[in-house]
Amino acid sequence: MQSYTEENYLKTIYHLAEKTINVQTNAIAEQMQTKPASVTDMIKKLADKGLVDYIKYQGVTLTEIGKNTAIDIVRKHRLWEVFLVDKLNFKWDEVHDVAEELEHIKSIELIERLDEFLGFPKADPHGDPIPDKNGRFAKTQFIKLIELKIGDQGTITGVTQHSSAFLKHLEKLGLTLGKKIQISDVTDFDGSVEILLADKQVNISREVAKHILISSNGKN
């Protein structure tokens, strides 16, 4: 049985490990907003429990048990986000902090019933894939909006930036999940993108475009 803090560390290491094999303690400290010395102490505790492998100066990797634990936490977090949006009418920019609390519920039976109640969703309200009870993720194919060319079209399927400010910005522009878009123009000077959304033109910065995920349909 892990504490809330230990579970948060495992989840953080799991997400960081999606970008690098050996996760550095400084990266964990930055993500957790704590001191590197505190991270080192926690990593030693997790290593003693067989949840991580740690070699000084080389970084941290999750053991098989640690990875499975982290995936289970991710699953609970994303299922709760679906529940909050679909059943309690929260907005997609409001659910992260609430799900952070709910993800630590230990009852396996509750989570299985929640999954069934929601119809076994494959993705959360931000488009992130939800693993099944065996830890398997559904395969998804998408590209970043910034990679599309003029004339390309597709459907918004997710985001890589989950901050409330960013999600509110997308909502204001009408760029939410499931919306179909087409690239009208790309500005050479600053990389900003002009999008055809329904019957209106929407202009977004390069910074925004690189955080929007698209299921591409090619050119019209």
Image (cartoon, helix red, strand yellow):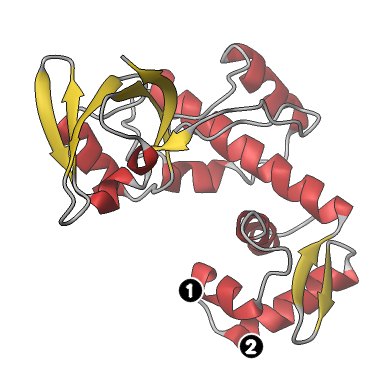
Percent x, y of residue 72:
72, 41
Disc 1 from disc 2: Cα separation: 12 Å
Q: Are marks 1 and 2 in contact (CB under 8 Å)?
A: no
Amino acid type of the residue that numbered disc 1 sits on in the rendered structure: Gln
Q: Which residue is mark 1?
A: 33
Foreground of the two, 165 or 183: 183
Q: Quadrant of residue 183?
A: top left
Q: Which residue is mark 2?
A: 37
Vertical comparison of 203 with 64: above or below: above
User: What's the amino acid at mark 2?
Assistant: Ala
How many marks the image carries: the answer is 2
Q: Judge whether 140 appears above or below 67 on screen.
A: above
Q: Position of residue 115 (x, y in %)?
A: 64, 20
Q: Residue at x 87, y 52 (%)?
A: 64
Quarter of the view holding residue 74: top right
Above or below: residue 89 compared with residue 39: above
Q: Quadrant of the N terminus?
A: bottom right
Q: Secondary structure at mark 1?
A: loop
